[in-house]
Structures are given as C-alpha cells and as structure tokens.
Image (cartoon, grey):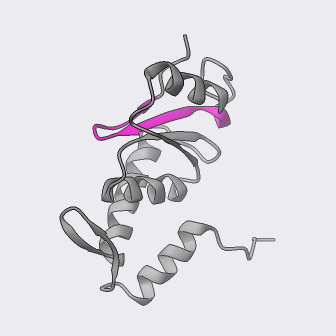
Amino acid sequence: PPSTVKLLHQWFETTAQRHPTRPALLGATGLVSYRELDERAAELADYLRAAGVRPGNFVGLFMAKSTELYVAMLAVLKAGAAYVPLDVSFPAERVAFILSDCGAPAADHRPRARAWRVDRHGPEPAPAAG
C-alpha cells in the first residue's frame, strides 16, 4: 500500500500550491516566491535525474549559503536522494573523506550508494577518495 507519510519536499510542494506568490525566502537578489523556488527545484531535480542521480543516492552540496543552496536541497529531495551538506571552507581531503564515508563510488559500488556533488557549476559525480 502507498505510504501516507509526507516527505519534507512534499510538504514544501503543498505549501507552494496553496501559497504560490508568498515569499519563501529572502536571498541576495530579493524575495523568492514559493512557486519560483519550487519550479527551480523541480528543474534541477529533472537535471539531476537525467545526470544519473537515483533514489537512495547521496548528493554532496558544496555551496555557500544562498538561494541556490535551498534550490539544490529541495531538488535533491525531489529526485529521491539525500543531500550531504559540505561547507565551502572544507579542504578537498575532508570533502573526499565525507563523500567516501557516505558511500562514494570508490568506497561502495552499489548503485544506491552513488555519491554526487553539486556546486555552482551543476551536478557531477563526486571525486573518489584517494
């Protein structure tokens, strides 16, 4: 039977449907409505799926706090994956360790454990820990 439990992104989608023009957040460039945030997240979620992100994957978000970070967080959830927040101040070795620890391809080759990184250039497979 289908689950009746709503996931975080589904609660957001419900709010976006009920209050599309209300402000969802205030970013560096101004207010962003629920509709705009939801549409941008849906577009990125489609891109992530097309790039190979699958339910159960981990997606590292290597981004500064911004509107784009919120878009990416929602997009990862809409794609059925889990996001791993990575501070932009982390050294490359720490990022590689975290991604490896959460199931990056070098550490775990099962499809559900594939790790991805999203930065300001878009999604890409995470670097393998060396």
Tell me which segment is drawn in magenta: 112-125
Where on the picture, by quarter, is residue 17? bottom left
Residue 9 placed where, x, y %? 54, 67
Residue 118 placed where, x, y %? 40, 39
Of residues 55 and 130, the one drawn nearer to the viewer in this rendering: 130
Of residues 82 and 53, the one drawn nearer to the viewer in this rendering: 82
Q: Residue at image x 36%, y 52%?
A: 65
Outermost residue toward the bottom? 18
Asked if the magenta segment contains residue 121, the reply would be yes
Residue 111 placed where, x, y %? 65, 32
Vertical side of 73 occupied by 54: above or below: above
Asked if the magenta segment contains residue 55, the reply would be no
Outermost residue toward the front? 89
Outermost residue toward the top? 130
Horizontally, residue 106 falls left or right of residue 5, namely left
Q: Residue at image x 65%, y 45%?
A: 56
Q: Residue at image x 35%, y 58%?
A: 43
Vertical side of 23 occupied by 92: above or below: above
Residue 78 placed where, x, y %? 51, 59
Q: Quadrant of the N terminus?
A: bottom right
**How many numbered marks are there?**
0
Q: Main secondary structure of the magenta part?
A: strand
Of residues 54 and 64, the one drawn nearer to the viewer in this rendering: 64
Q: Residue at image x 38%, y 47%?
A: 47
Where on the picture, by quarter, is residue 57? top right
Outermost residue toward the left? 29
Q: Quadrant of the C terminus?
A: top right
Vertical side of 43 occupied by 125: above or below: above
Horizontally, residue 115 falls left or right of residue 5, namely left
